[in-house]
Image: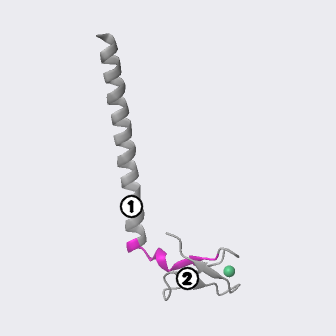
Amino acid sequence: MIKIEFSLAIAVYLGLTVGLILLVWIYFEKRKTLESFYSENRFFWQCSICTYVYIDSMHNLISQCPRCGSYNKKEG
Ligand SMILES: [Zn+2]
């Protein structure tokens, strides 16, 4: 009797933990997607070579750094 209750408690505990992690994960994924959609952050580029931050609203996938001239690819 005690053994069954113990395994049941562990099952409930595991289920709640996994559910909570899933909820938090979905929440952060949704927030990340909304941010990239609605904020102006997509126009901001940071050069991977010289870490110079600039604005380029003309390009979506690849942009050229105005300082060092290297090409930067948008990730995510
Ligand atoms: Zn650069």
In this rendering, the answer to whether 41 lies above or below 4 is below
Residue to which mark 1 is pinned: 31
| Viewer-side residue, 51 vs 76 | 76
Comes first in the chain, label 1 or label 2: 1
Magenta region includes residue 45:
yes
* Residues rendered magenta in the picture: 37-47
Q: In the rendered image, which quarter is residue 68 located in?
A: bottom right
**Residue 14, located in which quarter of the rendered image?**
top left
The residue located at (37%, 25%) in the rendering is 10
Residue 48 shown left or right of residue 4 in the figure = right
Q: Nearer the viewer, residue 50 or 74?
A: 74
User: Of helix, strand and loop, which one carries label 2?
Assistant: strand
Circle 1: residue type: Arg
Query: What amino acid type is highlighted by mark number 2?
Result: Ile
Q: Of residues 36 and 3, which is closer to you in this image?
A: 3
59 inside magenta stretch: no
Dot 1: what SS? Answer: helix
**Residue found at x 37% / y 67%:** 34
Mark 2, residue position = 62
